[in-house]
Amino acid sequence: MASAKIYHISKKYLILPFTLFNNNMIRTVAIFFTISTIFIATSCLDGIDENPYPRTPELEESELNEALQKLVAEGYDIDTTNLGIYYIVNEEGEGPLAKAGDTLSLEYTGYFFGGQVFDASAYHYEDSIWKFVFKEMNLIPGFEDGISIMNKGAGIEMIIPSQYAYGAYGYGPVGPYTTILFSAKLHDLEPGVE
């Protein structure tokens, strides 16, 4: 059985099995970890300038056109806002449209064409409802534009091209030149003070 060195530290004893390794082995392991750390750190730096998403505006446009054609072929009525956001009304609302200063209670899910969810009000709020004052915070232009055509009780699907979302750089799980979709339901609209 290998002996261990005993070190006295603050009236407690620490037993280290240094005798299991000789000095050459310890030095070899230390060098290996140092080189590995340097290699890993520099290999991570090599890809910083590279775009991990080989997406282009042309690819996005092609995907968007294909998706819109498929929705029309399936009988969906697609409309467009003045900004250029495509939307499908799932449920008509009542009353005035949302405007700056109104307090909104919105339930939403953000997803990609393939159905993968990247954000949802359910991720952030226990009751899945996001309550906020409209146009008092920065939202992506397409989402804000889509909300502005909703009134109390309305439910819509928004199709937002990247130029009105996260553009050429993307953000978080949303890659560059990626059209995003939102399913949104406006549960309540409290008019702001005029």
Image (cartoon, rainbow, N blue to C red):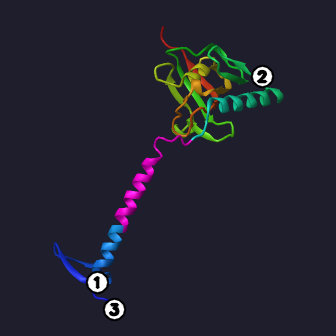
* Residue located at (83% from left, 28% from top): 73
Whole-percent x, y for residue 43 in the image: 44, 53
- Which residue position is annotated with label 2? 77
Query: How many other residues sit within 10 Å of disc 2, few (<14), some (14-19) or many (≥20)?
Result: few
Secondary structure of the residue carrying numbered label 1: helix
Could you tell me how far apart the alpha carbons at marks 1 and 2 are, in whole angstroms?
77 Å
What's the residue type where badge 1 is placed?
Answer: Thr
Q: Is residue 30 above or below residue 155?
A: below
Residue 140 magenta-highlighted: no
Query: How many other residues sit within 10 Å of disc 1, few (<14), some (14-19) or many (≥20)?
Result: few
Q: Is residue 30 above or below residue 103?
A: below
Q: Would you identify the image quadrant in which residue 32 lies?
A: bottom left
Whole-percent x, y for residue 25 in the image: 33, 77
Are dots 1 and 2 in contact, CB under 8 Å? no
* Residue located at (59% from left, 23% from top): 142
Q: Nearer the viewer, residue 143 or 173?
A: 173
- Which residue position is annotated with label 1? 19
- Which residue position is annotated with label 3? 1
- Check residue 102 in the rendering and tell me which mark sits there, or answer none: none
Q: Nearer the viewer, residue 87 or 68?
A: 68
Secondary structure of the residue carrying numbered label 3: loop
* Residue located at (68% from left, 22% from top): 86
In-image side of 20 versus 192 (left or right): left
In-image side of 108 versus 1 (left or right): right
